[in-house]
Image: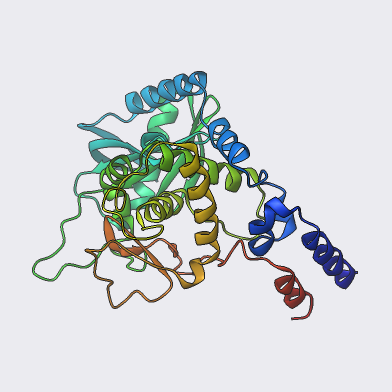
Amino acid sequence: KLENTVNELENTVNNVKKENELLKEIICHQYLTALPPLTEKSIVEWCKSAKPSDEEKKDVTKATQEIQSCFRANRTISGYISNKHHSMYVEDVVQGGSTEKETSVKGRFDLDMVLFIRNFEYSKMIEYKRLAQHHVEDHHRKIEWLKDTPAGSTYKFQNIEVDVLFTGKYKAAKPIAEPIAYTNEKTRFYMASLVKEQVAYVHDKAGPVELDCIIGIKKWIKKKNWDEIRPPSSYLIEVLVIHTAYTPWGKPDPEVDNKKLPDNDDNRFRLFKKVLRALTKLSDAEIKLENQTRPPSISKPYVLDPVNKHNNLLRGPSDKLLNLPFLALLVETARNKANP
C-alpha cells in the first residue's frame, strides 16, 4: 500500500500545472496544496490577505495593555512557594515577537512579553514561573495561565495567547565572556534579553516588500499542519527574507543592492519565489552578515542571528538541527521512508 501511495504521489507531482513548475521542483504535493499558484497576482493577493485586520490590531493592543498592567516594570512580585517566601524584582517589561515587528499573520496573533528580572539566575526559572502564575491568579483573573515553557509560561487573555519570558541583563565575566547560546546552559535563558535588538533589526531592514513577503511565507507555514516536521521559526523567516532581499539578484547595482527593495508587485513576486528556493537550500546554508565572523563552535549549515553570532537559527535549545530541508520532500524522500 505504501508503495502504491508513493506511485500515486509521483504521478500527482508530475501532473502539477506548468505555472507551478518551481513548486514541482521543490515541494511534495501534500505541502504544495497549501500555496496559491505562483503567479504575480496570486502571490500579491495572498500576501495582502495575510495582513491582520484593524479589529485584530485593536484586540492585540487591548491584550498588550492588560499584560503590561499585570507585569509592570519597577515592582516586586512576591509569594509563597512550598511554604517558603520568594520574590523577584521586575526591572523592565519589553514586548517582542511578530506583533512588535509588524510581521503577524491574520488570525494567528500571539504576543511575546519579556520580563527582565534584577539579579536574574537561570537556576531560579521555576521559581519565577510560579511567582508570576500566583500573581496572575490572585490579581488578574481576566488572564489565564495555560502552560509552562522552557523559558517562561504561556498565558491567555480573551482569544490571544501571550508568551511571558524571564531573563535578565547579561553581565558576562571579563575579559573572557561566555557567549549567549542555546548550547550553553548558563546563558541560554539570556537569549530573550536580545529582544530589543532583534525587533530593531527587522524594523530597520524590512520595507513594505520584505514585510509582505515575510507575512505571506508565515501564512503558508502556519496554515499547513506539518505533522512531525519542525518548520522554520518566525524569526528565521524574517532573517531569511531580509537576507534574500539584500543579496544582489543579478549584476551588482549600488542603487538597489544592500537596500530595501523598491515597493512594487514585481519585487514582491520575485522575492517570494526566491525565498521559497532559499528554504529548500537551508541544509547547505552559510548565511551571516558581512561583518560577522562565524564562531568556531558553529558549523555548516547555519543562519547566524544578526544580533548574536553565537545563535544559529537552524538549531534550537536541544542543539538538534532543524529537519532540513523541510520542504524538499520529493518522491525520492518518500521512497526512502518506504524502504528504510
Which color scheme did the rendering employ for the protein? rainbow
Left or right: 249 with respect to 336? left
> Which residue is at 28% across, 78% downward?
296
- Residue 107 visible in this rendered orientation of the protein: no
> Which residue is at 51% across, 67% downward?
281
Left or right: 12 with respect to 64? right
Residue 156 lies, in percent from the top left, at 50, 31
Residue 292 lies, in percent from the top left, at 24, 65
Left or right: 310 with respect to 34? left
Residue 265 lies, in percent from the top left, at 49, 37
* Count of number-bearing discs: 0
Q: Nearer the viewer, residue 111 or 152?
A: 111
- Residue 243 visible in this rendered orientation of the protein: yes
| Quadrant that contains the N terminus | bottom right
Residue that sits furthest to the bottom in the current view: 340
> Which residue is at 72% across, 74% downward?
332
| Quadrant that contains the C terminus | bottom right
With respect to residue 11, does 129 lie above or below?
above
Q: Nearer the viewer, residue 129 or 83?
A: 129
Q: Nearer the viewer, residue 315 or 102?
A: 102
Residue 228 lies, in percent from the top left, at 65, 60
Q: Nearer the viewer, residue 71 or 198?
A: 198
> Which residue is at 60% across, 37% downward?
41
